[in-house]
Image (cartoon, rainbow, N blue to C red):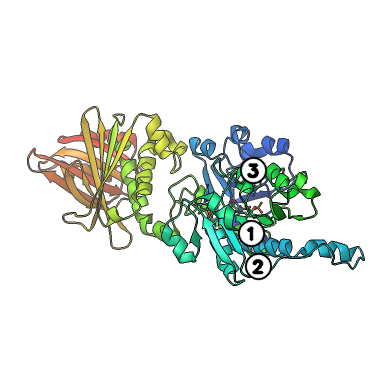
Amino acid sequence: MKILVSEPIAEKGLEKLVQEGATVDLKTSLTRQELLKIIGEYDALIVRSNTKVNEELYQKATQLKVVGRAGNGVDNIDMDGATKRGIIVVNTPDSNSVSACELTIGLLLATCRNIPQHHIRLKGKVWDRSGLKGMELLDKTVGIVGLGRIGSLVATRLKSFGMKIVAYDPYISDSRFQHVGVEKKEKLEDLMRVCDILTVHTPKTEETYGMIGKEQLAVAKKGLTVINCARAGIVNEVALIEALKTKIVARVGIDVPEGEPEPISPLLEYDNVIVTPHAGADTKEAQDNVGVTIAQEVISALRGEMVPNAVNLPTLHTQELAAVKNYLKLGETMGKLYYQLEKEAVEKVEITYRGEVAAMETSVISLAILKGLFEPVLKEKVNYVNASVVAKSRGVVVTESKESEVDSYLTLITVKVISKGKEFTISGTVFGKDDLRIVEINGYEFDVIPMPYMLIAENMDKPGVVGQMGTLLGVAKVNIATMQLGRKLTDNRAMMVLTVDSEVSKETLEFVGGVDGILRVRFVKL
Ligand SMILES: NC(=O)C1=CN([C@@H]2O[C@H](COP(=O)(O)OP(=O)(O)OC[C@H]3O[C@@H](n4cnc5c(N)ncnc54)[C@H](O)[C@@H]3O)[C@@H](O)[C@H]2O)C=CC1
Ligand SMILES: O=C(O)C(=O)COP(=O)(O)O
């Protein structure tokens, strides 16, 4: 595991990566050309907000499997490009929210009380309070745009200043507004009309970029204070400067000016504008949190495990992930069996979840099944991120259905693979906490614990076949660990599933296949 860390992360995070056996190169002052030159050597890249992870980089990053964003915003990462290539993008969305919130409050107070301006005068040995009258927060209205993690933390803290809080966020439920204790505004303009202080906490997306512009500022109360601790451009800087000139906006506090990391924003020229150099997450606590979390996530992702904060995968919280973990293993195992038993190209995959599993986040289990299905033919080129893209690109139709009830088991997954009119089915369950079982293949019933090496044979249901097979394997020094037989009395056929302790050579397989009554036999590796 070779990992490049292109921006500073906490020592604890670097230590964690090394403890987990990774080779880590911390290179935080590479030029773009230098980065592009060496990125081809690495399995993972860890960045913060300054490294642009885009098509140009992906084209050179031939070994790249994981991009770790040591922080929250992923606007510097081309997500489609990553997904297309099966590169998993992970971030640490909860690890620096408190720090970003606290800087927001800090900028808000500093802006409303002109703290930096006072400080600069006094540092210059000038004792002069004139022209810097501040504004109290008590009884003022703050308008929050984006009531997510950071917006909610800001709301909770500002309540203790006796402020009235209104918020605009069309993507969250009314109950969330009630839970945070904030008045909901249906339209952004309604919020702009009533607030004394505006603070934005949305991600930077096509929709939010420039969302606070000329029109929105035109309806604002005169003397508005604007705080932006999210991303440059969510508040349009040209419109903001115009509003500063016309005194619609009285004060501005910004953590991320346009043009970062170059200090080129024209806002820097204004005395009533306070700017910090994207310092929202720069606390010891946040960086320790972020560093350790990203290290864990990148390692898990490199090991092919499902990660809670994978940005280009279905969202899973840690608890949900713990609940589906064994089903992911089961699904992948079931998927892996198909191409080792059958040779027909897959046309359709029908997945049925029954019983307990039907109540879980099954979309990730379906990804695990597809990953397992295509792995024997595509090797490491398929993973959780691109499994459904791979299925689509191969013209495979995937359907998912759920039934709450199931006979005989508490929980059951059945995968039906359809190819050229033929159907292959396999079912599996989880007993207790983590006891995985394959319980059906093509209508034959078993109770098999999947093992790394297995022999699966279809045979005539007649005396002597099993014995001869055992003898031949013994001669070839292949130790049989377990053996199970499933039979269909209707057609005199049976299926044998053996778990064995070692690989079975081609020659042995041919001998076994030649036994009278064996219809076909396959060696399966899981
Ligand atoms: N300055 C800094 O160092 C830091 C900045 N950030 C930035 O803070 C911002 C917010 O982060 P979180 O609260 O963690 O994100 P979040 O995802 O928890 O919340 C964002 C909220 O914005 C809402 N939203 C999306 N589009 C919207 C629209 N068009 N109008 C109104 N609301 C909209 C979403 O529904 C969501 O509730 C992000 O831009 C992030 O990159 C985060 C950490 C540190
Ligand atoms: O986590 C975020 O979204 C941030 O904005 C923090 O950025 P940084 O890691 O300090 O470059």
Farthest residue in the left direction? Answer: 490
Determine crowd level at label 1: few under 14, some 14-19, many 20+ residues with C-alpha closer than 10 A.
many
The numbered mark, 3 or 2, whose residue comes first in the sequence reads 2
Q: Are marks 2 and 1 in contact (CB under 8 Å)?
A: yes
First in residue order: circle 1 vs circle 3:
1
Give the x, y percent position of residue 163: 59, 68
35 or 463, which lies in front?
35
**Residue bearing the label numbered 2:** 137
The secondary structure type at the circle numbered 1 is strand
**Crowdedness near tag 3: few (<14), some (14–19) or many (≥20) residues, C-alpha within 10 Å:** some
Measured as percent of width and height from the top left, residue 349 is found at 29, 37
The answer to whether one can see residue 260 in this image is: no
Q: What is the three-letter code of the residue carrying label 1?
A: Ile
- In the rendered picture of this protein, how many numbered marks are placed on residues? 3
Residue drawn at (69%, 35%) of the image: 37
Q: Which three-letter amino acid code belongs to the residue tagged 3?
A: Lys
Q: Which residue is mark 1?
A: 197
Dividing the picture into quadrants, the one containing residue 176 is bottom left
Residue drawn at (68%, 62%), measured in percent from left and top?
Answer: 108
**Gap between marks 2 and 1 measured at Cα:** 9 Å
The residue under label 3 is: 214
Q: Amino acid at mark 2?
A: Leu
Residue at 68% in and 57% down: 225
Position of 473 compared to 189: left or right?
Answer: left
Mark 1 Cβ inside 8 Å of ligand 1: no
Residue 415 position (above or below residue 410): above
1 to 94, vertically: above or below:
above
**Marks 1 and 3, how far apart at CA:** 17 Å
Locate residue 75, reporting x and y percent: 59, 44
Left/right of residue 516 with respect to residue 182 in the rendered view: left
- The answer to whether the residue bearing label 2 lies less than 8 angstroms from the nearest atom of ligand 1 is no
